[in-house]
């Protein structure tokens, strides 16, 4: 069971890196501003997913547990058993902050896209590139 | 969505998975999760609810909430300030807007409106429950705010925005609630410090429970359920902050076109 | 006993299909629906990797707020990219 988990974990990390690559390709190859914004959102999501999968762990027997105490512990031995079984909680706190800040920047970028449309009449980026030449 | 696109997508996925499994079998790239966690994570898990060591504990059963609001509370307050500055930036871009009232019969068909009248109050109830139990079960302030702001967004999409105005959601009132809740978070973070100045003991800023050299603490039991002190109040105020701020942005983005055009004409006469 | 491993494999496969289709599509309403489907796949993977707080924060943002925001902007600008 543990060997299968190791193999699947390598495949899944490769899938996340491939997602990152496809979203980065989408940022610079499509000429519409809204499509560029959507590709940036996909890129941010893949990076957050890689950060969470660093904090995973394996046990000899069984599957690990989430970092929440299921009931009020009554002896210190229960707390010791909990620290041997649970997943890393510090990375989840960092990823929560990253999700909030990413969403705030996303909302601001869409406001700038609306201002661009009001000035040029279209969301195509080639129209503003022709003006410079 | 033509057939050519679907075939290319499926073959791309199969190629990525086949190459990575071939690299694994040949022992070239092996990425495995470890058998032991780091020592820092072990100390956070051990001291988050520990009634036998009163100087390092925080009486919260949810370890991630204790890390966010108690052990690294300054990071979360600054992240709320980043969200606040994004909302101020959006307000600056869309100045001079006037709201127009007047209810009209628009929106989607009757089959869509009927179930959504039942679901929309339930979404807000789920949000409030996630905020109040944030220190005992998975949940917290920001999760509750994000869940509860789906309800006004659905009202804008299914009914019309005039329905939202008729339910008394004005932009000025929402911005006021947002600012007052953020000021409440800052007041709670220095509350024990002011208490120590008045009663002449020793206390720190952003303090939650007993630490070295100081004996002041916030309430930590509620009849027979552990209440994690300032984490409970932070969760409720963060819920109000996020709900009011995000609904304000959604209303500004989806107003009628006439209101914003009057602002644009004013700016052009200045230049 | 193999259930978490099988779920991880299937939904990783579906997420890469949905990402590619969301970028290649020219009608942006359909691309927003593909983004919401990719958010659902990622939320299930977050649950299997034992992170419940991140799941509860990610589900309303990726499947509820971001597609509605893009729909509001599409209504006021162009819908089909050229």
Image (cartoon, coloured by chain):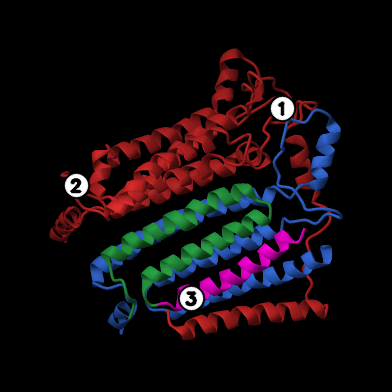
Chain colours: A blue, B red, C green
Q: Is residue C17 magenta?
A: yes
Q: State whether discs 3 and 1 lie on one chain.
A: no
Q: Nearer the viewer, residue B243 or B184?
A: B243
* On screen, residue B193 above or below B92: above
Quarter occupied by the N terminus of chain B: bottom left
Per the image, label 2 sits on a secondary structure element best described as loop
Picture quarter with the C terminus of chain B:
bottom left
Res A56 visible: yes
Q: Quadrant of residue B102?
A: top left
Residue carrying label 1: B211
Q: Residue at x 74, y 41 (%)?
A: B44
Q: Which residues are magenta?
A: C1-25
Chain for mark 3?
C
Q: Earlier in the sequence, mark 1 or mark 2?
A: 2
Which of discs 3 and 1 lies nearer the camera? The answer is 3
Q: Position of residue B61 (x, y in %)?
A: 68, 34
Residue denoted by label 2: B98
Q: Secondary structure at mark 3?
A: helix
> Where residue A72 sits in the image (x, y, percent)?
73, 30
Q: CA distance from mark 2 to mark 3?
A: 41 Å
Instruction: Using the rendered image, report if marks 1 and 2 lie on a common chain.
Output: yes
Name the dominant secondary structure of the magenta segment.
Answer: helix
């Amino acid at each position: 069971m543990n060997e299968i988990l190791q193999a699947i974990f390598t495949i899944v990390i490769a899938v996340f890196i491939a997602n990152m690559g496809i979203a980065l390709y989408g940022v610079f190859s499509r000429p519409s501003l809204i499509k560029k914004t959507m590709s940036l959102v996909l890129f941010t999501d893949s990076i957050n997913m890689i950060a969470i999968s660093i904090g995973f762990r394996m046990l000899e027997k069984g599957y690990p547990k989430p970092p929440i105490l299921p009931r009020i512990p009554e002896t210190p031995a229960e707390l010791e058993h909990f620290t041997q079984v649970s997943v890393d909680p510090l990375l989840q706190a960092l990823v929560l902050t990253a999700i909030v800040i990413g969403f705030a920047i996303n909302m601001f970028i869409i406001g700038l896209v609306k201002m661009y449309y009001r000035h040029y009449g279209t969301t195509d980026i080639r129209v503003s590139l022709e003006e410079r030449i | 969505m033509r057939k050519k696109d679907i075939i290319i997508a499926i073959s791309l996925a199969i190629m990525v998975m086949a190459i990575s499994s071939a690299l694994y079998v040949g022992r070239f790239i092996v990425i495995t999760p470890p058998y032991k966690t780091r020592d820092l994570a072990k100390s956070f898990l051990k001291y988050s609810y520990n009634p036998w060591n009163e100087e390092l504990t925080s009486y919260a059963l949810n370890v991630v909430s204790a890390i966010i609001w108690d052990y690294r509370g300054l990071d979360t307050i600054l992240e709320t300030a980043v969200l606040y500055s994004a909302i101020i930036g959006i307000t600056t871009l869309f100045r001079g807007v006037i709201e127009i009232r007047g209810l009209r019969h628009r929106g989607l068909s009757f089959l869509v409106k009927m179930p959504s009248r039942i679901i929309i109050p339930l979404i807000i109830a789920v949000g409030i429950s996630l905020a109040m139990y944030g220190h005992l079960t998975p949940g917290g302030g920001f999760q509750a705010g994000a869940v509860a702001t789906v309800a006004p967004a659905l009202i804008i999409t299914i009914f019309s925005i005039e329905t939202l105005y008729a339910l008394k959601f004005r932009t000025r009132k929402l911005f006021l609630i947002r600012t007052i809740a953020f000021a409440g978070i800052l007041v709670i973070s220095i509350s024990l410090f002011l208490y120590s100045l008045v009663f002449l003991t020793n206390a720190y800023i952003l303090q939650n429970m007993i630490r070295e050299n100081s004996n002041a603490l916030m309430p930590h039991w509620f009849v027979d359920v552990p209440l994690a002190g300032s984490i409970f109040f932070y969760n409720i105020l963060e819920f109000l902050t996020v709900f009011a701020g995000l609904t304000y942005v959604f209303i500004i983005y989806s107003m009628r076109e006439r209101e914003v055009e009057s602002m644009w004409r004013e700016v052009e006469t200045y230049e | 006993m193999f259930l978490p491993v099988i779920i991880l494999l299937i939904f990783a496969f579906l997420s890469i299909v949905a990402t590619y289709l969301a970028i290649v599509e020219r009608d942006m309403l359909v691309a927003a629906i593909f983004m919401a489907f990719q958010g659902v796949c990622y939320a299930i993977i977050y649950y299997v990797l034992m992170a419940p707080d991140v799941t509860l924060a990610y589900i309303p943002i990726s499947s509820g707020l971001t597609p509605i925001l893009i729909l509001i902007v599409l209504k006021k600008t162009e819908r089909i990219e050229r």
